[in-house]
Image (cartoon, rainbow, N blue to C red):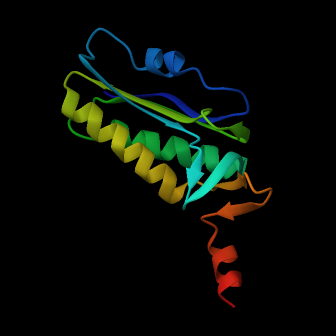
């Protein structure tokens, strides 16, 4: 049976080795990872950093649900860990780390991709980008987009 090794948010820097270790065990011949970092540009604008905010209780509950769903992929024996950072991050900082372990690489890759795609789609985490020109903007907020359109 697969297991939830880790799932949640972190106010402090994420150590990828800790997340990988959480899914490492003798039967897992394949471990897939995804590490998302803050890049220095977005939509043609220079980015200095960003701030992640979350509706913490709901975000952590949804992260656990997503990780649980991923453990059932393939033959239901995937070990999965996912940690997302909140707070202020600079360019190059790690924003999210996901690791999935399984006897075979395909199931590990599938679980890892599933988790990041579902986090982006379902977890109430928002980001405000800070730009080199001194401005900032919330990104991916449907309400903000609707207000800008009016």
Q: Is residue 75 above or below residue 138?
A: above
Q: Considering depth in this image, is 66 or 18 the residue closer to the camera?
A: 18
Q: Is residue 22 left or right of residue 48?
A: left
Q: Is residue 92 left or right of residue 48?
A: left
Which quadrant of the structure image shows residue 26? Answer: top left
Q: Considering depth in this image, is 16 or 72 the residue closer to the camera?
A: 16
Which residue sits at x=43%, y=40%?
68
Q: Considering depth in this image, is 37 or 99 the residue closer to the camera?
A: 37
Residue 111 visible in the snapshot: yes
Position of the N terminus by quadrant: top left
Q: Is residue 46 above or below residue 79?
A: below
Farthest right residue?
134
Which residue sits at x=28%, y=35%?
109
Q: Is residue 150 above or below residue 108?
A: below
Q: Position of residue 111 (x, y in %)?
A: 33, 39
Residue 72 visible in the snapshot: no
Q: Is residue 121 left or right of residue 131?
A: left
């Amino acid at each position: 049976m697969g297991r939830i090794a880790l799932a949640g948010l972190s106010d402090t820097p994420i150590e990828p080795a800790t997340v990988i270790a959480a899914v490492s065990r003798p039967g897992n011949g394949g471990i897939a990872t995804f590490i998302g970092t803050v890049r220095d540009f977005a939509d043609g604008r220079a980015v200095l950093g960003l701030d992640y905010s979350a509706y913490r209780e709901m975000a952590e509950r949804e992260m656990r649900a997503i990780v649980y769903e991923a453990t059932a992929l393939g033959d239901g024996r995937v070990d999965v860990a996912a940690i997302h950072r909140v707070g202020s991050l600079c360019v190059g900082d790690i924003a999210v780390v996901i690791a999935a372990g399984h006897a075979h690489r395909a199931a590990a890759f599938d679980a890892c991709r599933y988790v990041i795609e579902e986090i982006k789609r379902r977890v109430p985490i928002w980001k405000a980008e800070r730009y080199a020109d001194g401005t900032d903007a919330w990104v991916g907020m449907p309400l903000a987009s609707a207000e800008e359109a009016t």
